[in-house]
Amino acid sequence: SAVISQKPSRDICQRGTSLTIQCQVDSQVTMMFWYRQQPGQSLTLIATANQGSEATYESGFVIDKFPISRPNLTFSTLTVSNMSPEDSSIYLCSVESQGMGYTFGSGTRLTVV
Amino acid sequence: AQSVTQLDSQVPVFEEAPVELRCNYSSSVSVYLFWYVQYPNQGLQLLLKYLSGSTLVESINGFEAEFNKSQTSFHLRKPSVHISDTAEYFCAVSNTGNQFYFGTGTSLTVIP
């Protein structure tokens, strides 16, 4: 299955600032997915990132708040912009591993103070 | 639309005892079903999946799950748990393979 390197693993940020999270995959993948896991809750899909086109956002998530880049088939970034304490969550990227289901990155634990 | 219900948010169980983590789903179409595990301070890992074929699927560490279409369930079981099984377990459903719907998770705590 694909191997995903996600960084940073954790960060503590001041409100009003932005944080960019990176995901690197060891193989080429068509779609990458970004999820948020708020404290004590399950995962919620933020957006789907395709190479060469704009990301597709789920209801409740907008590009201005969560801009995504997908410059090639092995890399993607998610930026959490103008952060507030409500953005404190674990953010995970995911890709489909052919025949193996989906593989997730180790997550970025974000705390906004 | 799909949805997933994990009825038990927390399950404490003594070491070497059996455990069942319940998962029910709703969907109007055929689905793929998954169990993911999240160990403390780690990311999600695929535990097992049902795509087609045999309704009983097994993982390499002794867990198994059975797809029951009539009851729309995919419960996870293990006959004898270890301390190292302490983790958060998430059930997930997908129909197209492009998007997952996750349950709210079950926290399994194995007591020595």
Image: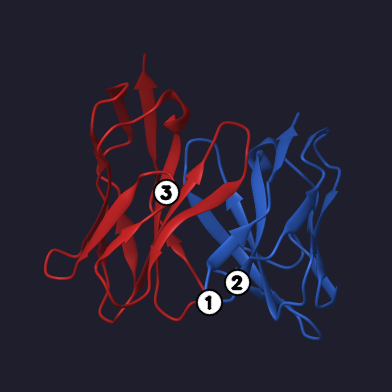
- Taking the image as shown, residue A82 lies to the left or right of residue B44, namely right
- Vertical placement of B41 versus A93: above or below? above
- Vertical placement of A34 versus B95: above or below? above
Assign a secondary structure to mark 1.
loop
Along the viewing direction, whichever of B62 and A52 lies nearer the viewer: B62
Q: Position of residue B112 (x, y in %)?
A: 37, 13
Task: Identify the colour of chain A in the image.
Answer: blue
Label 3 marks which chain's residue? B
Q: Which residue is mark 2?
A: A96
Q: Say yes or no: labels 3 and 2 on the same chain.
A: no
In percent of the image, x 77 and y 40: which residue is there? A9
Q: Position of residue A20 (x, y in %)?
A: 84, 53
Mark 1 and mark 2 in contact? Answer it, CB < 8 Å: yes
Q: Name the residue furthest bottom.
A: A52
Task: Tell me the distance, in whole angstroms, between the alpha carbons under discs 1 and 2.
Answer: 8 Å
Label 1 marks which chain's residue? B
Check disc 2: other Cα within 10 Å, few if <14, some if 14-19, many if 20+.
many
- Vertical placement of B72 versus B20: above or below? below
Q: Which residue is mark 1?
A: B98
Q: Amino acid at mark 1?
A: Asn
Q: Which residue is mark 3?
A: B90
Mark 1 and mark 3 in contact? Answer it, CB < 8 Å: no
**Image colouring:** by chain
The reply to whether residue A43 is visible in this rendering is yes
Task: Identify the colour of chain B in the image.
Answer: red
Assign a secondary structure to mark 3.
strand
Specify the quadrant that holds the C terminus of chain A. Answer: top right
Q: Amino acid at mark 2?
A: Glu
Q: Position of residue A99 (x, y in %)?
A: 52, 75
- Residue depth check, mark 1 versus mark 2: number of the one nearer the observer: 2
Task: Tell me the distance, in whole angstroms, between the alpha carbons under discs 1 and 3.
Answer: 17 Å
Specify the quadrant that holds the N terminus of chain A. Answer: bottom right
